[in-house]
Image (cartoon, helix red, strand yellow):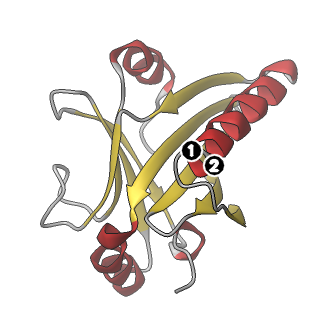
Amino acid sequence: MIDHRTENVTDEQTGGWTRVLEEMDAMAAKLADNGWETVSIAAGDAAAVTAETSRTGTHGFSYVVPGNAATAFEELFVADGFPRTEVYRANSPSHLYLLTVVKDPPTEAAVLIAGAIERNQLSACKQAATEAGKLYTNLLAVDGTCLGSFEHEDPTPFFPEE
């Protein structure tokens, strides 16, 4: 299941990224207050990729996970887990700021991933996702090793309307 919310921002330098990080922190705190185990990741780098340009051979979004969050993510991550996805977007002329929240309700675990994607990268990724009817969120270590991936059955909420 995918939920989503979109917001347009005009302050290019701080607006979108700051809002996404604030939203991530607030959501993580609320989840933790309700007993959930969370990992928040502010990606060191993020990109919209196709199968040809990705390190994992899948289309979607790739995020470089800083070392301090990588260990926590690896401890929490379960392949094929986290069936619920929430997507929050803030748009600017040059970037798409994404906050992707994946949840595993039975274990009360959540991973929150924030990234800034250059808008000029979106077209090919969106086309691949639309054709496949799904999208992937890939988390990578600084050295490029894939730490884990999430599959999303509906790519629509991840992309701004043109």
Instruction: Report the disc number at residue 15.
Output: 2
Does the image show residue 63?
Answer: no
Residue type of the residue flagged with mark 2: Gly
Q: Residues within 10 Å of mark 1 (few under 14, many from 20)?
A: many
Which is closer to the viewer, label 2 or label 1? 2
In this picture, residue 45 sits left or right of residue 87: left
Label 2: element kind: helix
In this picture, residue 111 sits left or right of residue 35: left
**How many angstroms separate mark 2 from mark 1 (CA)?**
6 Å
22 and 81: which is toward the camera: 22
Residue at 60 percent across and 51 percent down: it is 16
Residue at 55 percent across and 75 percent down: it is 160
The quadrant of the picture occupied by the N terminus is bottom right
Q: Quadrant of residue 142?
A: top left
Q: Given contact means CB atoms under 8 Å apart, are the residues at marks 2 and 1 in contact?
A: yes
**Location of residue 120 with respect to 115 vertically, above or below:** below
State the image coordinates of residue 20 (x, y, percent, origin top left).
63, 44
116 and 103: which is toward the camera: 116
Label 1: element kind: helix
The total number of labels drawn is 2
Q: In which quarter of the image is residue 109?
A: top right
In this picture, residue 109 sits left or right of residue 153: right
Instruction: Report the disc number at residue 17.
Output: 1
Residue type of the residue flagged with mark 1: Trp
Residue at 28 percent across and 78 percent down: it is 124
Q: Quadrant of residue 22?
A: top right
Does the image show residue 125?
Answer: yes
State the image coordinates of residue 149 (x, y, percent, origin top left).
37, 45
Q: How crowded is mark 2: few (under 14 residues within 10 Å), some or many (20 or more)?
A: some
